[in-house]
């Protein structure tokens, strides 16, 4: 009986202390909602800087705490998307092409030369077509917060200057694990393979791949120019990140909290676009004029660029058939209207 009495007193004391602790937390840290964001880029990359700006903006009134996990700390992009679905991560920041299972027409964004310019791509994604893709994601258990910039992709290699589609033939090329990318380069005569992003530098250094393709910011931040002799400004594909949030977390927020997240995201996105304008020219100049790593930067003439655009037509026709003429034509019309 004495043992039972002591156990009861101990349990009562513990419950009382817990109640006191909870009462103290509800007025302070207990009300703070934590958002965990994962992505695969380096901390120096402009997308990471956009999330830092988002964090700064959202944390101002003390309602949210934002934790950012760069450099694939939560795994690759596919793994991070799954972590969002299970709730282990609040948000992931994958390239849009990793979400085609949930919203198939998102694959259209990363087809070659479908946008006239970077601004044309930004306008298209901000418009009705781009917002419809976000709605399709929500129907499949994810909340698409919007789009972040990845950029126009360019070609680098360690074998020869590339100025024509014919120059691609015979090169071993790493691409994103995106079927449209692999299809394009193989169609041009390369041996292209989708491989994990984290392994790119080592694979280029070892000679497993002769070349790769990425936006300027990634080529710079990941130091690919250290192991690539030639860089051709093909601008062949526009890529965007598509931040996705756990559906249950989002629906558990008040309307005011959702608005605060949307507003902070816009601040981060606008900051990123300004940063890219400033950084890209500087990064390109540093790559071209680096005393230690001699990377030749090749800017295509209009005729040379046109040759690449024409060479990409079979890839576009293939995906028009695969995704359906109606969906493809609707996207192309949206891109034309967004000029």
Image (cartoon, grey):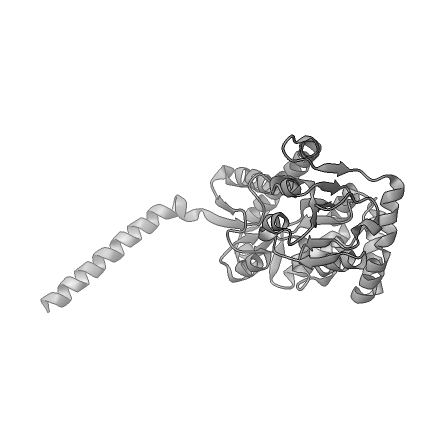
Q: Residue at x 47, y 49 (%)?
A: 33
Q: Residue furthest right?
A: 303
Relative height, residue 30 to residue 107 (above, below): above
Question: Total label count?
Answer: 0
Name the foreground residue: 57 vs 194: 194
The picture places residue 245, in percent across and down from the top left corner, at 57, 54
The picture places residue 187, in percent across and down from the top left corner, at 80, 59
Relative height, residue 69 to residue 270 (above, below): below
Specify the quadrant that holds the N terminus: bottom left
Specify the quadrant that holds the C terminus: top right
The picture places residue 68, in percent across and down from the top left corner, at 51, 46
Q: Residue at x 86, y 39 (%)?
A: 301
The reply, left or right, for residue 105 in relation to residue 303 is: left
The reply, left or right, for residue 310 in relation to residue 270 is: right
Residue 135 in view of the camera: no
Quadrant assignment, res 273: top right
The picture places residue 289, in percent across and down from the top left corner, at 69, 30
Q: Residue at x 64, y 49 (%)?
A: 204
Q: Residue furthest bottom?
A: 1
Q: Residue furthest left?
A: 2
């Amino acid at each position: 009986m004495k043992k039972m009495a002591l156990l009861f007193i101990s349990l009562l004391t513990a419950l009382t202390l817990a109640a006191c602790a909870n009462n103290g937390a509800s007025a302070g840290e207990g009300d703070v909602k934590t958002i965990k964001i994962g992505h695969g880029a380096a901390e120096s990359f402009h997308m990471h800087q956009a999330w830092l700006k988002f964090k700064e903006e959202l944390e101002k009134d003390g309602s949210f705490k934002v934790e950012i996990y760069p450099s694939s700390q939560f795994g690759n992009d596919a793994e991070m998307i799954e972590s969002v679905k299970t709730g282990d991560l609040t948000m992931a920041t994958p390239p849009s092409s990793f979400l085609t299972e949930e919203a198939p027409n998102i694959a259209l964004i990363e087809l070659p030369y479908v946008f006239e310019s970077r601004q044309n791509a930004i306008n298209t994604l901000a418009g009705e077509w781009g917002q419809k893709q976000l709605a399709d994601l929500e129907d499949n258990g994810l909340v698409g917060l919007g789009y972040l910039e990845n950029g126009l992709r360019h070609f680098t290699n360690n074998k020869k200057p590339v100025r024509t589609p014919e120059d691609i033939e015979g090169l071993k090329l790493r691409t994103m694990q995106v079927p449209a990318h692999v299809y394009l380069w193989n169609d041009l005569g390369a041996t292209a393979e989708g491989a994990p992003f984290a392994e790119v530098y080592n694979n280029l250094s070892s000679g497993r791949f002769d070349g790769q393709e990425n936006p300027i910011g990634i080529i710079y931040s990941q130091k690919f120019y250290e192991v690539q002799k030639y860089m051709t400004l093909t601008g062949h594909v526009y890529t965007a990140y598509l931040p996705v949030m756990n559906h249950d977390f989002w629906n558990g927020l008040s309307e005011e909290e959702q608005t605060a997240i949307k507003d902070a995201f816009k601040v981060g996105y606008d900051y990123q676009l300004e940063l890219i304008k400033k950084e890209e020219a500087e990064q390109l100049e540093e790559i071209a004029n680096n005393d230690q790593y001699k990377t030749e930067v090749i800017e295509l003439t209009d005729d040379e660029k046109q040759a690449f655009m024409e060479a990409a037509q079979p890839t576009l026709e293939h995906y028009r058939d695969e995704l359906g003429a109606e969906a493809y034509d609707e996207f192309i019309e949206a891109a034309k209207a967004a000029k």
